[in-house]
Image (cartoon, rainbow, N blue to C red):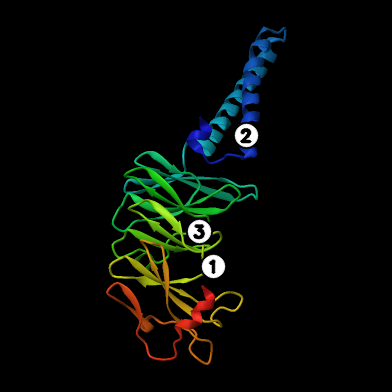
Amino acid sequence: MMLRVGRTNEGNQFTFIALAVVAFVFLGAIALAPSVYRSRVRIIGKVLVLPTLVFVASFAAYAGAGFVEQAFLWPSGQVVDGDFVVKIWSGPDPSGGTTEIRALYFRGSDVTERLRRYVHHSTRPAVIIYERYESGGEVATYAFDGETFRTLRLTPLYGIPVDPDHQWSPDKTRLVLDVDGLHLFDVARWRVSRLTGEGTPPKELHSVNLAGWSPGSRRFAVIDPGKPPFPNQQPSVLTEWDAETLMARVVGCMPDPPGRGAWQDTDFAWQADSLIVTAQGPRDARCAAGLQ
């Protein structure tokens, strides 16, 4: 029960050993007290030994209560954020310093242990995107909906939106994450789709840049700066993704030098929910054919 309440020191061998020693001393002192009292030791010996045993037992009980309080039962602090509460436990780590472990709750119910950080949905306070430490120290990203108490894993790595106004669609129903590939999270349907990366066609192992959403929240633009190890020295591709069909369409491509090698916000625009190239200059849509 202590582990279920505290959740913070699973695997902390020092705490378990310390508690075992405290319990052994306490029980040993209690067990010895009657034996000493019934023994043939002179009164003066009993007067000295019995208070000593009582002191040892009391000290052991006090120390044990301190360990339990600090390591298992009561958090060292908490932060209230609307219907969410973050409880914080602080304790020693193997290196001799201190470590802080946090757990997230929604209206008193456990959402996640080993919380790293989280952000709210801009229009739905009960929906959050959070990161948590997995076994082995990795960090994965999840979505949680307090209205339905659903949890969905979004990416296997860090994935908190760094630019929510840019990554969320205008109607706030979809979120684009560029984490080990391109991911699309649909809040209304409560699903995540991996658009690029390992095991998905097309296989793109490098990062891309989200270039914004269409006004109708149906499509979004992505700029592919080129494959490693020399990004921006290959043709930079401008692609339009359909959030409903999950299909991509190449809109244009920047040629190699001496032409410009990177797209700018003024080079393209949304027209009737469709992406078009607006800038003048060298363009060649055919140069993207070999990159798809």
- Residue 134 image point, x, y percent: 55, 49
Query: What amino acid type should be assigned to the residue bearing mark 1?
Result: Glu
Numbered badge on residue 204: 1
Q: Which of the labelled discs sits on residue 14, or is there none?
A: none
x and y percentages locating residue 18 in the rendered image: 63, 34
| Three-letter amino acid code of the residue under disc 3 | Tyr
Q: Nearer the viewer, residue 139 or 177?
A: 177
Depth check, mark 1 against mark 2: the one in front is 1
Q: Position of residue 221 (x, y in %)?
A: 39, 72
In the rendered view, does 122 fall on the left or right side of 239? left
The earlier-in-sequence mark between 1 and 3 is 3
- Alpha carbon of mark 3 to alpha carbon of mark 2: how far? 32 Å
Q: Earlier in the sequence, mark 3 or mark 2?
A: 2
Secondary element at image label 3: loop
Dot 2 corresponds to which residue? 16
Q: Distance of mark 1 from mark 2, alpha carbons?
A: 47 Å
Q: Residues within 10 Å of mark 3 (few under 14, many from 20)?
A: many
Does residue 2 appear left or right of residue 267 in this picture? Answer: right
Front in this rendered view, residue 241 or 123:
241
Query: What residue is pinned by disc 3?
Result: 158
Q: CA distance from mark 1 to mark 3?
A: 18 Å
